[in-house]
Image: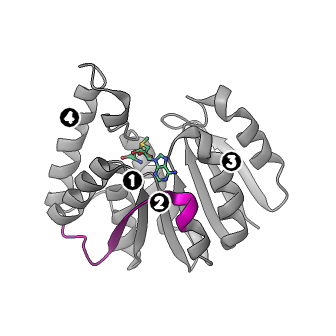
Amino acid sequence: MFHNMPKAFRERMRTLEQVDARDRTDGTPRSLRLRQIPRETGKLIALLAASAPEGDWLEIGTGAGYSTLWLALACLETSRNLVTVEVSEEKVRLARETIRLTGLESIVKCIRGDALEYIPHVNRLSFCFLDAEKDVYMSCYDAVVPRMVKGGLLVADNAISHGEILGPFIETALHDERVDAMVVPVGSGVLVCRRG
Ligand SMILES: C[S@@+](CC[C@H](N)C(=O)[O-])C[C@H]1O[C@@H](n2cnc3c(N)ncnc32)[C@H](O)[C@@H]1O
């Protein structure tokens, strides 16, 4: 996945990394910033997705499609598809541009809307990446876990960077007997849960 990344992926990732870095310093309002995962987190979610059992894949919080590209590497590796849900119209526009530029139209579907309204439409999730506003993490978790297949993975970003606000959510996951969970200190901290 990482050694023979398609040229279009590399180019779009580089562009989005540059925009994201600029956003963080030039006063771009929070709602317009891309707030992307770092590369190491991209690699981790690609490795985890590629190791997920049979079932559907879902990303919650597409942004401009940077994390989506890392997951798409796993899609290409395993011949799977991905649905990614994003609430912001402007981010959906950017993500669809990412999908078009990288030729992923038949593999990645970007849906505009609130993930909480989309999740009830999925029933055999084997991989879910959660990277939305922190106040929806708990509701997303509650909706996703019952819909996961055995061995399915739920991966949530910012477990360390937003440890204070996400504390109750992380404690819930760590004590939830339906899953085995731990926080991996990569990037902003990644909560990894495996459905038993
Ligand atoms: C941190 S950014 C995502 C960055 C992206 N995962 C990446 O690494 O490239 C969080 C995104 O979640 C979106 N979002 C927030 N609440 C949402 C919800 N309830 N459903 C879908 N998207 C949501 C925001 O609009 C924002 O674009």
Residue for point 56% across, 80% down: 54
Labelled pair 2, 4 in contact (Cβ < 8 Å): no
Q: Residue at x 56, y 70 (%)?
A: 52
| Front position in the image: 92 or 1 | 92
Q: Earlier in the sequence, mark 2 or mark 4?
A: 4
The kind of secondary structure element at disc 3 is helix
Which residue in the protein does label 2 denote? Answer: 59
Magenta-colored span: 103-118
Q: Nearer the viewer, mark 2 or mark 4?
A: 2
* Residue at mark 4: 18
Is 10 on the left-hand or right-hand side of 90?
A: left
Q: Kindly identify the amino acid type of the residue bearing the numbered disc 1.
A: Thr
Question: In the image, is the residue at mark 2 within 8 Å of ligand 1 by its beta carbon?
Answer: yes
Taking the spot 61% from the left edge, 37% from the top edge, the residue there is 159
Q: Is residue 81 above or below residue 167?
A: below
Q: Is residue 122 magenta?
A: no
Residue 38 lies, with reference to residue 81, above or below; the image says above
How far, Cα to Cα, is label 3 from label 2?
15 Å
Q: Is tag 4's residue or tag 3's residue first in the polypeptide sequence?
A: 4
Q: CA distance from mark 2 to mark 4?
A: 22 Å
Tag 3 or tag 1, which sits nearer the N-term?
A: 1
What residue did someone put label 1 on?
A: 62
Of badges 4 and 3, nearer the viewer stands: 3
Image marks 2 and 1: residues in contact by CB distance under 8 Å? yes
> Where residue 195 sits in the image (x, y, percent)?
72, 65
**61 displayed left or right of 161:** left
Q: Which mark is residue 144?
A: none
**What amino acid is found at the position of numbered circle 4 in the picture?**
Gln
Q: Which mark is residue 138?
A: 3
